[in-house]
Amino acid sequence: MTTTTTTSLPFSQFYDLWFDHLNRLVQQLATTTTTDGPDKDHLLNLINKVMSHYEDLYRAKSVAAEKDPLHVLTCPWATTLERSLHWITGWRPTTAFHLIYTESSLLFESHIIDILRGLHTGDLRDLSPVQFRRVSELQCDTVKEENAITEELSEWQDSANEIMAQCTDINEKIGRLVSIIKKADDLRLRTLRSVVGLLSPQQAIEFLIASAEMLVGIRGWGLNHDRTRRR
């Protein structure tokens, strides 16, 4: 998706296009997992392509938040199911760590015989002790940042009475909301980058597939639910 597309479309339309492209990227990623000995440069190229796609999303959302942060805060482009799971207009950054632990455990259980034989696969079932420690440390840091941003939003919401009583202060209050939304998205993107950075290319591909499939699955369920509710 181009920068022109990012800035010229209403965010809801941009998001629909962005999500369609995410589906196509997932299919490309999945193809690499069925290929024997995929080329490392090819894997790195795909990883960079996916990360650039997420960067496009948050760049466009930042522009939308500057124009109308209250609109962005309500996430009208999302389904009711997605909004029920949201943390400040999107997925909770610490979800990334739950995905790693879940995927690693599932793969470990399904290939435990090979692992006991000492076979190394290089995928998420093959996380090293050093990688687990770094994941755990990153998770702790991310939880602290999540909590700090959550507290900042809570303080902003508590100041609603002040906004009503002091109309002259409203621009400053709205500016704080823009900052909070951007901080939340920045933490999401930094968490993705950090997790991908501590994984091998093959592990990063599997993580990106799992995270994208989670987003696609939740959106699919949400769309079906909303269609059923409207009947």
Image: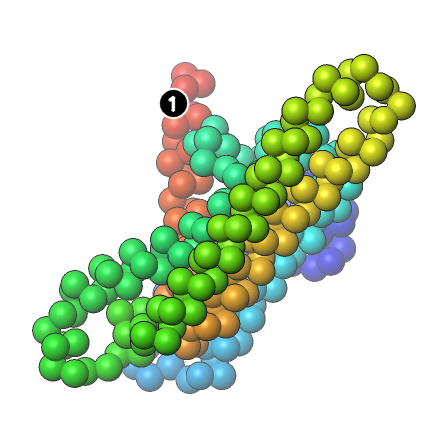
Q: Is residue 153 left or right of residue 215?
A: right
Q: Which residue position is annotated with label 1?
A: 228
Residue 131 higher or lower than 85, as above or below: below
Left or right, 32 with respect to 14, comes to: left
Give the quadrant of the C terminus: top left
Q: How many marks?
A: 1
Residue at image location 54% in from the left, 47% down from the top: 146
Under circle 1, the secondary element is helix
Q: In this rendering, is residue 69 above or below 27?
A: above
Which image quarter holds the N terminus?
bottom right
Quarter holding residue 168: top right
Q: Residue lying farthest right?
A: 168
Q: Nearer the viewer, residue 82 or 38?
A: 82
Residue 69, above or below 140: above
Residue drawn at x 48%, y 68% is 196
**Residue at left offset 19%, top offset 82%:** 119
Pinpoint residue 213: horizontal percent, then vertical percent: 39, 52
Q: x, y percentage for residue 187?
A: 59, 53
Badge 1: few (under 14), some or many (20 or more) residues near its Cα, within 10 Å?
A: few
Whether residue 15 is visible to the viewer of this picture, yes or no, is: no
Q: Residue at x 75, y 46 (%)?
A: 63
